[in-house]
Amino acid sequence: MSQSVKKIAVTGAAGQIAYSLLWRIANGDVYGKDTPIELQLLEIPDAISGAEGVAMELNDSAFPLLKNIVVTDKLEEAFDGTNAAFLVGAKPRGKGEERSDLLAANGKIFGPQGAAINDHAADDIRVLVVGNPANTNALIAMHAAKDVPNDRFNAMMRLDHNRALSQLSAKLGCDKNDINDLVVWGNHSATQFPDLTYTTVAGEKIFDSLDHSWYVDEFIPRVAKRGAEIIEVRGKSSAASAASSAIDHMHDWINGTERWATAAIPSDGSYGIPEGLIVGLPTVSRGGAWEIVSGLELSDFQKARIEANVTELEEERNAVSHLLG
Ligand code: NAD
Ligand code: LMR
């Protein structure tokens, strides 16, 4: 039986991530193949024509599930009745920059968007912030949406998680689908901590037999700095892989997963991480909500890595305190 129509907002609709993301959404990869969708595309006035061109191409693709497309530069139209919002629209970094260097330019985008989501979105709204620095931008949007439960605001760290899966499977020569219990703690920044302490491959723990110098000196920095490596080699920041990971995140959030995923969600104080910070955590998704995997023992090495992320996220939060109403 056909489901009721879902409205999905995508900001930065004329940008490079949206050019991959929108085709996956229109294909039914978020809500499923029996759920019709409407797209609400937000752009800044200077890029509206680009977004209109994207909408023309989406129409030309004749997706059976895609019932309507709105292209707008008005927040209240973009988030009107929205069930799921991908907040992508923001400046990407260039070579030699850190993502936190974008905070001054991008942070101010997310307060007004959070406020418009608060006033206009559907009750079941789920928001995934992709624009960098994603964790702190999500914090800004969450603070501006006083009537929306905090846990509806996530930042994307699924790309980091997928990068970790890929690097590990290449090292061990194993199938990515056989890897479980992997997490990337912290911030979507070079400080992030891709953690293999609990990881299993085909049900077997691997940590004790792992090459620890590879883990510490190659795996962790490779995953944490992969975004910069892509910029160096490709000349532009990641786009299709970011879009694919955004689909993975929203799909699993809505439809559930018992396999661990990394989602950056508001901390509930678990693992000594201050409540409210939006932080990458080990999660599963049940009944349409992320649940933090509980009861994990942390070594001193893990605690130090997580603490470095907390310090950085607190510094970012302090830098935008004027935007946290
Ligand atoms: P892009 O420059 O190709 O596109 C960004 C688009 O956003 C542009 O079309 C721009 O006009 C639009 N935009 C700017 N301000 C806006 C606003 N206030 N409202 C609506 N639209 C607005 O950039 P991109 O490559 O698509 O990347 C977008 C963001 O995603 C960047 O900040 C990038 O760093 C980030 N990113 C995050 C991850 C992650 O894992 N979290 C991965 C890749 C990229
Ligand atoms: C990524 O991880 O690829 C994105 O956050 C883009 C970037 O600036 O690294």
Image: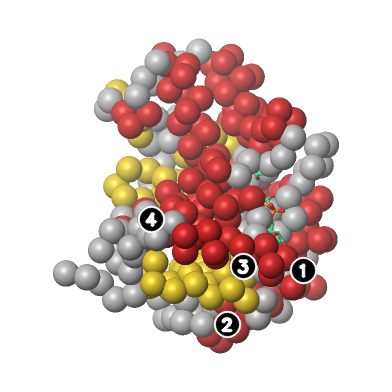
**Res. 2 mark:** none
**Res. 46 mark:** 1
Point 51% across, 82% down: residue = 80
Query: Of circles 1 and 3, which is in front?
Result: 3
Q: Nearer the viewer, residue 266 or 174?
A: 174
Q: Quadrant of the C terminus?
A: bottom right
Kind of residue at disc 3: Glu
Query: Of circles 4 and 3, which is in front?
Result: 3
Q: In the rendering, at what x and y percent does residue 74 appear?
A: 65, 80
Lower position in the chain sequence, tag 4 or tag 1: 4
Kind of residue at disc 2: Glu
**Counting other residues with Cα less than 10 Å from the Cα at mark 3, is it few (<14), some (14-19), or many (20 or more)?**
some
Q: CA distance from mark 1 to mark 2?
A: 17 Å
Q: CA distance from mark 2 to mark 3?
A: 15 Å
Q: Is residue 319 above or below residue 201?
A: below
Lower position in the chain sequence, tag 2 or tag 3: 3
Q: CA distance from mark 4 to mark 2?
A: 23 Å
Q: Quadrant of residue 89?
A: bottom right
Q: CA distance from mark 1 to mark 3?
A: 12 Å
Callout 2: helix, strand or loop?
Answer: helix
Q: CA distance from mark 4 to mark 3?
A: 19 Å
Q: Which residue is mark 4?
A: 27
Kind of residue at disc 1: Asp
The answer to whether 249 appears left or right of 130 in the picture is: left
Q: Are marks 4 and 1 in contact (CB under 8 Å)?
A: no
Callout 1: helix, strand or loop?
Answer: helix
Q: Quadrant of residue 287?
A: bottom left
Residue 94, visible in the rendered structure: yes
Q: Are marks 4 and 2 in contact (CB under 8 Å)?
A: no
Q: CA distance from mark 4 to mark 1?
A: 28 Å
